[in-house]
Image (cartoon, rainbow, N blue to C red):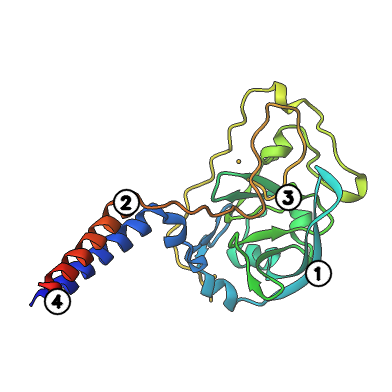
Amino acid sequence: MKKSSFSATLLIITVIAGASFAAANPANAQSNPSQWQLSVTGLVANPFNLTPSEMQALPQTTINAVLYCVDSPGYVVAQGNWTGVKLWVLLEQAGFSQDAVKVAFFAADGYATDLTLATAKRNDVIVAYQKDGLPLSESLRLVVPGKWGYKWIAQLTQIELVNFDFKGMWESQGYPDTADISEGAPMPATAPGLQEPYSYPSPSPSPSVAPASPSPSPSVSPAVPSPSPTPVAVADAKTFEFPLVLLVVVPLVLLELVALAFRKRR
């Protein structure tokens, strides 16, 4: 009887400790990369959402490309075989309007960038979900070979077709909208550090429509005078937080073990 009581107590303590650990470490508890969703909205005939399985059911394209940051033009941030869906395939599926003049991109962390329709039509511009055969830690990344990293938006959640000259975060701060690496490391036309804090444009609400067919930050950022928006790292480091409840649980377990041993002696 005493042994059963001890086992039950130990089980309850273990459950409490496990729940506390999950609550104290939400990043670990919610790290499932299959939970993302991509929305295509704006000036389109068929706005839709894509889940990971629906995205992967579309025709795949793999390209070899190099990601460069304007902070360190000679340093390779990431290189490899990126696999995903051509951006133009997604836009054609949505049935974009002839009034559209630009493509706006929005990330889960609020970052924004843009591409012209001419660039969006390129066969090597893809929305990638894998690199070298492995899922991306950032879920989705826009891969734009030949462009500086501030166009390679990570954690992509929404693509919106617009009928005006939309500019993303760094583009609206004065960095060249073309972002061509062949033109050298760009310098802003204005001084971002002297301007008012940047306000992200508000994307249109994501539609709840299912797709017609089967799915502070850029990972890199240009150098700007201080103060400036804080860039987000290519991969966010996960930190371990020790659950405070274990400070109570561990002594209780030890006391129970000591009490059990004392009862056995008697």
The residue at which mark 3 appears reads as 151
- Which sits in the foreground, 265 or 127? 265
Could you say whether the residue bearing mark 1 is in a helix, strand or loop?
strand
| In front: label 4 or label 2 | 4
For the residue carrying disc 4, how many other residues have a C-alpha within 10 Å: few (<14), some (14-19), or many (20+)?
few
Nearest to N terminus: mark 1 or mark 4: 4
Disc 4 marks a residue whose amino acid type is Lys
Quadrant of residue 96 within the rendered picture: bottom right
Q: Name the residue under label 1.
A: 64
Q: Residue 3 carries which label?
A: 4
Please say whether residue 12 is visible from this viewpoint.
no
Residue occupying the far front of the picture = 265
Q: Residue 168 carries which label?
A: none
Vertical side of 42 occupied by 263: above or below = below
Q: Which amino acid does label 1 sit on?
A: Asn
Name the residue nearer the viewer: 43 or 186.
186
Say which of 266 and 64 sits in front: 266
Is the C-beta separation of discs 4 and 2 under 8 Å?
Answer: no
Left or right of 166: which side holds 110? left
Q: Is residue 208 above or below residue 263?
A: above
The spot of residue 61 in percent (x, y) is: 72, 74
Mark 3, mark 4: which one is toward the viewer?
Answer: 4
